[in-house]
Amino acid sequence: MCWEISVLYFGHITSPKSSATAGIDDDLILDNPYLGFLLQKDGENVLVDTGINERFIVDGKAWAGKPAVGGTKYVIEALKNKGLTPDDIDIVIYTHLHNDHAGGCSLFPNALTIFQKDELYNLLNPLPSQKIRSDYDMDVIDELLSLKNICMVDGDGELGNGIKYYKTPGHTLGSMSIYVNTEYGPRIMIGDFCHYTYMLFPQTERIMLADGTVKKITPLPESYGPVFAHNVVYDHYAFYDSYYKLKSLVPKFEPRYFLCGHDAKLLYTGAKNDFV
Ligand SMILES: [Zn+2]
């Protein structure tokens, strides 16, 4: 049986592409969507990530002082567009607990809430560099831990409903990727392991912006290696290990299998992810 994946828009944050690829495509400004994913099968509703909380957007600015829109009303609206309310969500599973991925956790007090044990450790004990960037919304701690039905996992595994999860640290200590089978084949939601496809496939030549337009981008130099270790990788050793783990999970290493946490094209392609 296949899962149906819907891509949900929870707001966006605006930043130049050059903040990731310094000196390359310096004039390109990206509206990076905050994405969630709704997984549905046999009447079950599973939500991957819950966006940013409105308290974390001050004077219209969020992470790193960048302009942003978002908040719990966006999560509620996105679910409403699918005919759902937060109460209809059976399981919430987190790719990681960054401010823009776990901000709406308190909307789902009754859902089974799944995250990696090491990710909670990272949330409770951010590194100085992570504190400087305000990667985590520390108000999430109390909200998350007051939820009734938490399930902390450690490593790789499979849920009773067939959803698989793989620990893929690098971006954070306890990042994980969520694997499901769909009518299009396997799809893996990798969170911010790579925010955009061009990071996972550095030779990418085109990018789709949040308004649906397509721009040429500069393929990254071969010396960048098989995967671009972007500027929010805290553990490069773990990052490359995770890259090879992800690579081993798909029939062929092609972009369509991977759904990145902020890739605007997904708003148009959905989980089919057939824009290359
Ligand atoms: Zn993140």
Image: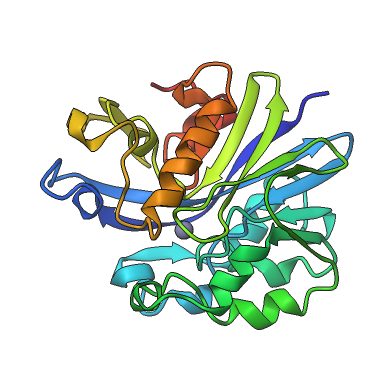
Can residue 172 be seen by looking at this rendering?
A: yes
Which residue appears at 34% of the width and 36% of the height? 227
Name the foreground residue: 129 vs 141.
129
Quadrant holding the N terminus: top right
Q: Position of residue 122 (x, y in %)?
A: 54, 70
Q: Position of residue 53 (x, y in %)?
A: 55, 71
Q: Position of residue 15 (x, y in %)?
A: 27, 56
Which residue appears at 15% of the width and 50% of the height? 22
Q: How is the image coloured?
A: rainbow
Using the image, determine if residue 136 lies above or below residue 17.
Answer: below
- Which image quarter: residue 211? top left
Using the image, determine if residue 270 lies above or below residue 139.
Answer: above
Which residue appears at 28% of the width and 27% of the height? 206
Q: Position of residue 43 (x, y in %)?
A: 88, 39
- Which image quarter: residue 2? top right
| 30 sits to left or right of 160 | left
- Which image quarter: residue 145? bottom right
Can residue 213 be seen by looking at this rendering?
A: no
